[in-house]
Amino acid sequence: MSGKTIIEKILSKASGKDVWSNDRVWGEVDLVVIRDFGGPNAVLEFEKFTSNGKVKDPEKIALTFDYQAPAKDMKVAQNQTLCREFAKKQGIKNLFEVNWGIGQHVLLERGMIKPGSVVIGTDSHMNLLGSVGSFASGVGNTDIVASWYSGKLWFRVPETIKVIFKGKYKEPVSAKDLTLKFVKEMGTDKANYKSLELCGEPIDNLSLAGRLTLGSMMTEINAKIGFIQPNGEPLEFLRQRCGGELEIVTSDDEANFVDQIEINVDKLVPQIACPHSPDNVKPVEEVEGNPFNEGFIGSCTNGRLEDFKAAARILKKAGKIHPEVRLIITPATKEVAMDMLEAGLYQIFMSVGAMVTNPGCSLCTSGHHGVLGKGDVLLSTSNRNFLGKLGKGAEVYLCSPATVAASAVEGKITDPRKYW
């Protein structure tokens, strides 16, 4: 046989035997995560299936409250209470309350995600952890229950596409612009249930925040996982948080890839995904001047400190936002929020009229503050802009923090290079 890809190596280790693409295997799961959305149903199904039995290993389970945190109504509050009681009864110590922030980011900060690990969860964007070399996947309730009960889960080993990025670009063009160009070129069919290995100089130069941005949109192209090999600052982050030696999984030179794609980001300009699909991507300059009335900077895609620094640089220089624009700022985690506070970013945002909210998922779905009314138009740094996702009769554009900030100043879609 030929050499192995990253996913073949990870699932070979998890299953205890040599596996190859399209094999079906039972593999050990390192971490099973539920959140306050979807998680309560998994709890109820587990208790029914096991007649209120015990999970196999509470140390390999985590609960995160990030979807509607703190609870917005009685139903949400009761769901969160259900999860808290389950954690207490099962002896699960890894419960991250409503003040912690977005689950995947919190788990990273807490050193619970290692390269080569197998992680599943109820969040469809769990696979963003591929950006640090972990095989992570969003799954349904039955898969969660099976993993809690047995410690294992069934997988079909994905085929792998190698994606090589080439070229260079200059700020304020960012990882989000690279990601949107990538989404446009890949489309929504080519990567269906595929593992991607993302490499090349532009990828090697990405910060941890930039890699999370790219990793968080693998779901939007229907990829199973997108792996980025940890190096530089992201690798140092993992070493500090995880402690001990880390085993970095790489593909063999003779590994079998079903396809190899090159994406050139040379002279990349700011990009924007227009309604109503993440792959409906155009250069910002092509839609410049289109009106909007709400902006959002945050989410698992662009909720790190460097994202807010880019926006704050523009807003500080301009000194204001347009009076008809509502701008919502949401840190990904409590740690990010504290770093923002220390860096003086709260002062900048609030002085120009932006609203800074508690850490969490925020404006990814209609379950949050800032939901749109009919006719509203949102510029968002999130990862989805489907019709009706944030309000019936509304439109959503996806773009970088710099583009949202520059546009918020003028009250219309604006190329951020104007204010950089």
Image (cartoon, rainbow, N blue to C red):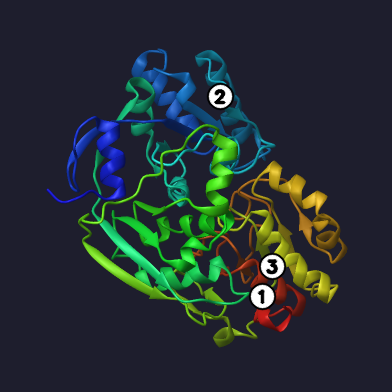
Q: Residues within 10 Å of mark 3 (few under 14, many from 20)?
A: many
- In the picture of the structure, the residue carrying the numbered disc 1 is 292
Percent x, y of residue 267: 52, 82
The amino acid at mark 2 is Leu
Could you tell me which residue is drawn at 76 percent across and 76 percent down?
A: 409
Q: Are marks 3 and 1 in contact (CB under 8 Å)?
A: yes
Type of amino acid under label 1? Phe
344 vs 192, left or right, is right
Residue at image coords 74%, 50%: 357
Residue at point 53%, 71% (across, down): 177
Name the element at disc 1: loop
Instruction: Give the CA distance from mark 3 to mark 2.
Output: 35 Å
Q: Quadrant of the C terminus?
A: bottom right
Rendered image: mark on residue 144: none
Quarter assignment of residue 95? top right
Tell me how far mark 2 sits from mark 1, CA to CA.
Answer: 40 Å
Q: Are the residues at dot 2 and dot 1 in contact (C-beta closer than 8 Å)?
A: no
Q: Secondary structure at mark 3?
A: strand
Q: Label 2 belongs to which residue?
A: 82
What's the amino acid at mark 3? Answer: Glu
Disc with the residue nearer the chain's start (3 vs 2): 2
User: In the rendered image, is residue 103 in sight?
Assistant: no
Q: How many C-alpha atoms fall within 10 Å of the one at disc 1: few (<14), some, or many (≥20)?
A: many
